[in-house]
Image (cartoon, grey):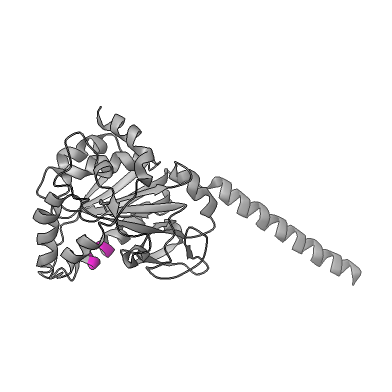
Amino acid sequence: MIIFHFIGKFRLFLLTLFLFFFSHFSILAKEPYKYDVAICAIFQNEAPYLREWIEFHKLVGVKHFYLYNNLSNDEYQKVLNPYIRSGEVDLIEWGYNTNPDGANWSTIQKMAYDHALNLTRNKVKWVAFIDTDEFLFPVQVDNLANFLQDYENFAAVCVNWQMYGTSGVKKISKGHLLIEDLIYKAPFDYYENMHVKSIVRPEFVETNVNPHSFAFQPGFYQVNANKEIFSGSYSAVIIDKIRINHYWTRDEHFFNHIKLARRQKWQDAGCITRASNINKEVDKAIFKYVPALKKILKK
């Protein structure tokens, strides 16, 4: 009996040893990610703003962009072609029409995001799903990849907005940056700043739920910047570690001639009041990136 007991224990030891080496070998054998940090965004008629947005996010450490064009008729291709040639941008034509009231816009975004998840799974370590009027940046460090190293046990880090208005700027001055001229925002705890956008690990995500949240595989969760697990699209406002500056109106010209017409078509009666509510206080936290970004854009 002692011999049989010893043989059984020895077999268990061999099996444990095999599983240990197999699992570690699998980790070592796994191909490294092609990109540490990428962004997915869907856009329409935003050519004048794309270069600043791309170069800003390159500056904070984004390595690749998956951009979904939704029926633009401006010069977006001319702006994006250098980035496509350099391999920094994948441009996907996403020619789905919105309903007259815009009710299906979230569905069009969700389809694009699920498409991007399939493109990036096991290829990109972190993907931020944001819009082209949103500027994502870490506050206490300068590089997103460095910031995200501390969150690798989670499926997603969710980041709060700070909503910015026109700041009384009729049109952004030639040679100036959008992030340089638009400095007035809503109060820190304005209710819409509870919205979050997600930076996700694609292999831990099952699907996109809506533009602000995702569903995850069992045992994986989203957290806020304080590593507190929560669900859904809203969180208590935290911007001391990482934040998104959401330039919802851009300047007055964009708001009056493009944004307002689009929102009124979608029967958004509150958009003018909203624009007024987010022009309240000065915030220049993003200015630490302005000198380097201006230097890049002058080239």
Characterize the magenta stretch by its predominant secondary structure. helix
What is the quadrant of residue 263 in the picture? Answer: bottom left
Q: Residue furthest top?
A: 299
The answer to whether 258 appears left or right of 106 in the picture is left
Horizontal relation, residue 236 to residue 16: left or right: left
* Residue stretch in magenta: 106-110
Residue positioned most to the front:
281
Residue 208, given in percent of the width and then of the height, sits at 34, 65
As rendered, which of 14 and 21 lies closer to the eye? 21
Q: Position of residue 62 (x, y in %)?
A: 38, 43
Extreme-right residue of the structure: 2
**What x and y, as percent, mark residue 176?**
22, 37
Q: Is residue 66 above or below residue 233?
A: above
Vertical position of residue 100 compared to residue 154: above or below: below
| Quadrant assignment, res 86 | top left
Residue 32 visible in the snapshot: no
Question: Is residue 239 something one can see in this rendering?
Answer: yes
Residue at 20%, 55% in the rendered image: 249
How many marks can you see?
A: 0
* Residue 45 point in image, percent of width and height: 14, 50
Q: Is residue 108 magenta?
A: yes
- Quadrant containing the N terminus is bottom right
Q: Is residue 16 above or below residue 72?
A: below
Quadrant in the picture for residue 71: bottom left
Q: Is residue 98 magenta?
A: no
* Residue sitting at x 35%, y 41%: 287
Quadrant where the C terminus sits is top left
